[in-house]
Image (spheres, rainbow, N blue to C red):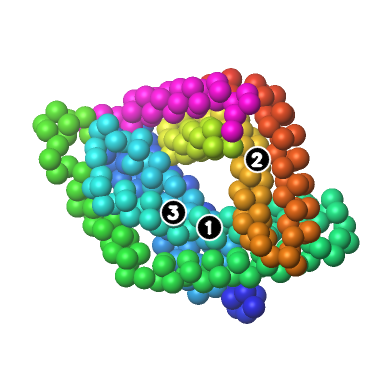
Amino acid sequence: MDAAVQFPTTPKAAKAAALHLSKRMSLEQSFEAIMRNGIEQILENEVGVTRFHDMESLHQMRVGVRRLRAALAMFDEVLRSPEEIALELVWLMDQLGPARDWDVLLTETLPQVEDALPGNPALAGVRDAVQQARLASHEQVAREVSSLRFKRLVKHLEQWVDQRGWRDGLSPKGKTRLKMHAVDFADTVLAAEQQRLLKRGSKLKGATPEQRHRVRIAAKRARYAAEFFASVYPARRVRPYLGAMAGLQRQLGLLNDGAVARKLVCKLCAGNDGLREGGALVCGYLACGEQRGGQQLGRWWKRHAPVAPF
């Protein structure tokens, strides 16, 4: 039985707390606030992941890791993080990712197939196999997030931020740049992330799943940048852009979920005679959905991409 079912007092998953930056803040102060915000989101979901195998806690921890990685990339030209931190954040994402993929397959993608093919007995075996794989994946994540490696990563991050370790090795000119206003830096970052998105999105027509995924990552980074600095701009200018990025990200996400789910099911059912029929039904349905979604993606791109950063 899933641990989240065994323990009805599962802690509520923690989304990122609202960031309150000001125009008077320096680049360094804004970076510190963003980093602390991401670390806090990871830590607040630790119990839900390790003790309760909670799906939403795992999702929010993963979002926290993505936000930290996005922040480090955005500020990279001004300050550099230790390579060890970057590598360990990649390690943590690699631990969280598979469990999240099984969660989405079981709770979102597979129900769509079952609704389209109601009462088909071949799908029951696929669901059971997916549930078992999901539980095993969550148990593995719980072990990794409980490990000394995870604790060392968090401690390293906290110490680096507390000690402002990014100052180590900076030239006098580099330290002066840390004093620039956050809003001036935000203008540059938002423009750069939007340019990255437009460049990748220009090749969406006929794109492979891997190419679409790259566009999705660019949309996420653009959205994170907007969320990080939203408080230094008027809300009336922020909302349209965040809405556009969320809409684009959602459509790209649905296509990515289908592609990932199809790979998981095909691999899970390969060589298993008892799952062959159900696996073929699921994979066939998802392949058709992916094709239809790819054809509609151009319309979504034209609707959302032209919205300029604030």
Kindly identify which residue carries mark 3. Answer: 93
Instruction: Indicate whether residue 206 is drawn in magenta.
Output: yes
**x then y, percent, for residue 256:** 61, 42
Q: Which residues are magenta?
A: 179-208
Q: Residue at x 60, y 29 (%)?
A: 207
Kindly identify which residue carries mark 2. Answer: 255
Label 3 residue SS = helix
**Mark 2: few/some/many CA within 10 Å (<14, 14-19, 20+):** many
First in sequence, mark 2 or 3: give its number: 3
- Of residue 15 and residue 62, the one placed in the foreground of this image is 62
Q: Amino acid at mark 1?
A: Pro
Label 1 residue SS = helix
First in sequence, mark 1 or 3: give its number: 3
Q: Amino acid at mark 3?
A: Met
Instruction: Give the main secondary structure of the magenta stretch.
Output: helix
Q: Residue at x 59, y 26 (%)?
A: 204
Label 2 residue SS = helix
Q: Amino acid at mark 2?
A: Leu
**x then y, percent, for residue 102:** 61, 59
Kindly identify which residue carries mark 1. Answer: 98
- Of residue 131 and residue 7, the one placed in the foreground of this image is 131
**Residue 109 in view here:** yes
**x then y, percent, for residue 310:** 49, 24
Is 248 rendered above or below residue 105?
above
